Image: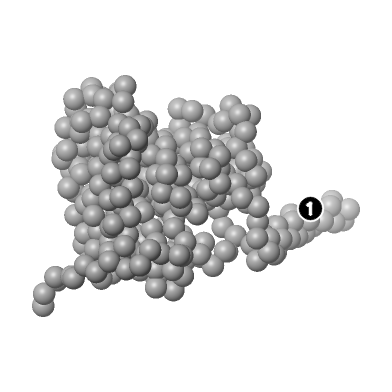
Amino acid sequence: MSSRRTLKARPVASGRRWVVKVGSNMVCSGGPLLIRSWMLQLRSLKRQHGIEVIWVTSGAIASARERTGLSKKKSAPLAEKQALSAIGQPLVMDLYNVALQSAGLLGAQVLLTYHDMASTHRRTNLQNTLEKLLSWDVIPILNENDAVATEEIKFGDNDSLSAKVATHLKADRLIILTDVDGLYDRDPRKDPRAQLIPHLKTVTLDHLRQTNSDGGSDRGTGGMYSKLLAARVAAQKGVETVLVRGDLPSILLRLAADEVVGTRIGRRLGKNLGKNLGKSLGKSLGKSLGKSFGKSLGRSR
């Protein structure tokens, strides 16, 4: 059976546009099954909700390290990181290509450097390329071109890259798929009383100061600090950001249905989302009050 696909440009979309960013830890730990699940959801987003997606992925260096068995030290020399990136980029794209094909979709790899966004001319070329790919219903899969980027001319992490792409491509929403449920009011690893924050109007300097800027896993360079910084950049241009666990079942479709999950940053809540958030908070508050009442009753006995 032929896998050839005819590309036909469609009229300029009047629907919604998302930028979805996924980190190294999710790509490497989730593997082919999780990536296939995401691609199947992209197909449903387009067909059922009219949402087109620009995908930003990490995982090249981490995938190369796992394949080669080289050290996972973040302090590795720049030349080693660049070489690992060159090994890892095709490994990551192989995962996406298999998943895309199983979903009946076609993807396109786009590797970026800092100058591609800093230069007006090159940024315009990038926008034109991405718009053309989207008009063909092709999924753009972006990553920083770490094989040639130097420490002085890097985005820093793909959280920053995704925020810049979301603002320049006029996305409605930036979705950051991570390995935690969202933003908490305190570190849930250290304090069991930590509560998930369902909505944050804006990211303030205080939020950034209270977050560890040296965070991130052994596989990735980002942490909650870089995600909040990206959300702050996006919010300044009117783009809502959602921080959410990426391996939750049908997570992208649930977000499309305005289910309250993860942490939403920016934009005022719509009526439906406000109702859903109220229900969610009501349940959470009810559980908390129930536990508190139960403890008090237990003491009185």
Mark 1 neighbour class, 10 Å CA radius: few under 14, some 14 to 19, many 20 or more: few
Q: Amino acid at mark 1?
A: Ser
On the question of residue 247 being in view, the answer is: yes
x and y, in percent, of residue 153 in the image: 31, 26
For mark 1, what is the residue?
292
x and y, in percent, of residue 232 in the image: 54, 38
x and y, in percent, of residue 22 in the image: 38, 48
**Front-lying residue, 183 or 101:** 101
Q: Residue at x 20, y 31 (%)?
A: 148
Q: Quadrant of residue 279?
A: bottom right
- Vertical placement of residue 190 versus 282, above or below: above
x and y, in percent, of residue 296 in the image: 84, 52
**Front-lying residue, 220 or 269:** 269
Quadrant that contains the C terminus: bottom right
Q: Residue at x 24, y 63 (%)?
A: 106
Residue at the extreme right: 300
SS type, badge 1: helix
Colouring of the image: one colour
- The answer to whether residue 120 is left or right of residue 238 is left
On the question of residue 280 being in view, the answer is: no
Residue at the extreme bottom: 1
**Front-lying residue, 265 or 36:** 265
Q: Quadrant of residue 79?
A: top left
Q: Residue at x 65, y 60 (%)?
A: 270
Q: Residue at x 28, y 57 (%)?
A: 132
- Vertical placement of residue 188 versus 181, above or below: above
Q: Quadrant of residue 69?
A: top left
- Vertical placement of residue 162 versus 132, above or below: above
- The answer to whether residue 210 is left or right of residue 164 is right
- Vertical placement of residue 225 versus 76, above or below: below
